[in-house]
Image: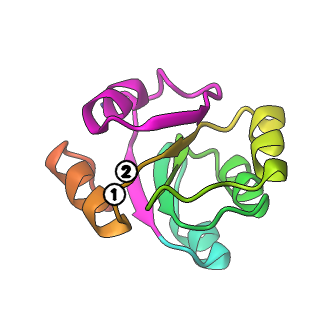
Amino acid sequence: MRLKEIIDALNLEILNQGDHLDDVVQGGYSGDLLSDVIASTRKNDLWITIQTHENIIAVASLKDLSGIILAKNSVPLNETLKNAKNESVTLLRSPMTSFELVAALSNLGISGKR
């Protein structure tokens, strides 16, 4: 499923569009410990987190993720938004909890396993 289809299906707010809206999302991951996300995600995964500092953009860029969803309407720092624009990382937001987002993505056919 393409990222833009997921955005529409889950009514996600786009904070920064990035370059990945037409990418096919290959999987998903939910976590807030950056070292775990680095070790556990793969290219074209969609990452769910409540972290809002600029280092999340570096992780998404490093791992070539399809995007980041900030759960619980988390508000990113200004530096995070600036870095998302500079790195063309798709940054999204939802009022849903991480658990609710994982369930919704699973219902759309997005899995944590590949």
- Image point (66%, 51%), residue name: 60
Left-right relation of 89 to 81: left
Q: Any mark on residue 112, and which?
A: none
- Image point (47%, 20%), residue name: 22
Q: Callout 2: 10 Å neighbours few (<14), some, many (20+)?
A: many
Sequence-first disc among 2 and 1: 2
Left-right relation of 88 to 72: right
- Image point (69%, 59%), residue name: 56
Residue located beneath label 2 in the image: 27
- Image point (49%, 46%), residue name: 93
- Helix, strand or loop status at disc 2: strand
**x, y percent for residue 96:** 33, 57
Left-right relation of 82 to 33: right
Identify residue type, mark 2: Gly
**x, y percent for residue 66:** 53, 40
The question of residue 75 being in magenta is answered with no
Q: Which residues are magenta?
A: 2-30
**x, y percent for residue 52:** 67, 62
**x, y percent for residue 73:** 48, 55
Residue at the far left in the pictured view:
107
Identify residue type, mark 1: Met
Label 2 vs label 1, nearer the camera: 1
**Which quadrant does the C terminus fall into?**
bottom left
- Helix, strand or loop status at disc 1: loop
Tally of numbered discs? 2
Residue located beneath label 1 in the image: 96
Instruction: Give the CA separation, mark 2 to mark 1.
Output: 19 Å
Left-right relation of 111 to 89: left
Q: Callout 1: 10 Å neighbours few (<14), some, many (20+)?
A: some
Q: Is residue 16 above or below residue 69?
A: above
